[in-house]
Image (cartoon, grey):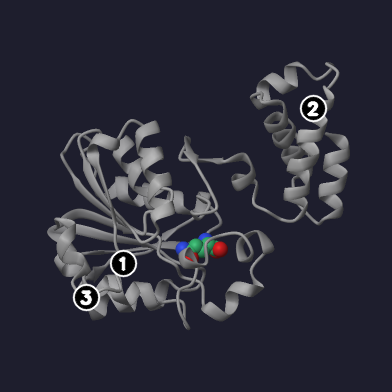
Amino acid sequence: MRDTAVALAAAGIDNVRFEARLLLAKAAGLPVEALIGRGRDPVAAAIVDALRSLSVRRLQHEPMAYILGEREFWGLPFKVTPEVLVPRPDSETIIEAGLALLPDRERCWRLLDLGLGSGCLLLTLLKELPNAGGVGLEISHGALEVARDNAAALDVAARATLVQGDWRQPGWEDRLGGPFDLVVSNPPYVESAAISRLMPEVAQYEPRQALDGGPDGLTAYRTIAAAGRRLVTPEGHLLFEVGHGQATEIVGILASVGLAPLPPWKDLGGIERVVGARH
Ligand code: GLN
């Protein structure tokens, strides 16, 4: 573990002791807690080999979540593969905002998630709202498979309708079965030209389709907002995750289509991260 941490540090990676411990646990096939309890056991050669292979991947800046195959979101375990964006703590702001807008946890709320990815937004909301039903739209077949696996593992598959589709196709919103009480989306929002300047974990490994927001980063917001008043019930809401510095422009996009913007929600870093609107 120490050798791994030294190698990771030399590659400019942060939190190296933490990551080295996770990689060793993965190599050993043990939960991290079990590893701590067995800190004095000799390590079998096969585990050393497995750890080296995992370390090589991390040294090339492959995201930990892809190496481990899992990432926690809102305290829930999500399967993660390179077909989906890695769930981020910032996106938990959407869950907080969504639950604040749907205060009666027992109601049969109807939810829609546009750009499902791993399913972390929709499936977490379904977990928190035990009588809600949800639709998830996702363009990537590979991502949809991951989301289906997560829905089954989290025991919400019976309340989740996960469909393949593309919001760039005319009439895309008509086949979703709306309107919905809450529409959530973490669409691609990085300016196309900025992607190559992101950290290698993101730029080289995460699905470009989940990141690329077009020339100004706002293409997906305009498309989704244009359908917003048809997708949301008269009492309903739309919530977008937004990139750093994008909140004001996206509030403007929502207002321009006749939705009533709400004050943005900040993430734990104090960044305006979620922009919402009423019908
Ligand atoms: N949060 C991601 C990043 O900053 C972007 C995700 C997105 O485009 N929706 O790299």
Going by the image, does 16 lie left or right of 97?
A: right
Helix, strand or loop under label 1: loop
User: In this orientation, does residue 271 appear?
Assistant: no
Q: Which sits in the foreground, 194 or 160?
A: 160
Q: Earlier in the sequence, mark 2 or mark 3?
A: 2
Tell me how far mark 2 sits from mark 3, CA to CA. 54 Å
Tell me how far mark 3 sits from mark 1, CA to CA. 9 Å
Helix, strand or loop under label 3: loop
Per the image, the residue denoted by label 1 is: 166
Residue extending furthest left? 234
Per the image, the residue denoted by label 3 is: 170
Tell me how far mark 2 sits from mark 1, CA to CA. 45 Å
Q: Is residue 23 above or below residue 225?
A: above
Residue 46 circle label: 2
Disc 2 residue type? Ala
Mark 3, Cα crowd under 10 Å, few <14 / some 14-19 / many 20+, is few
Q: Is residue 193 above or below residue 159?
A: below
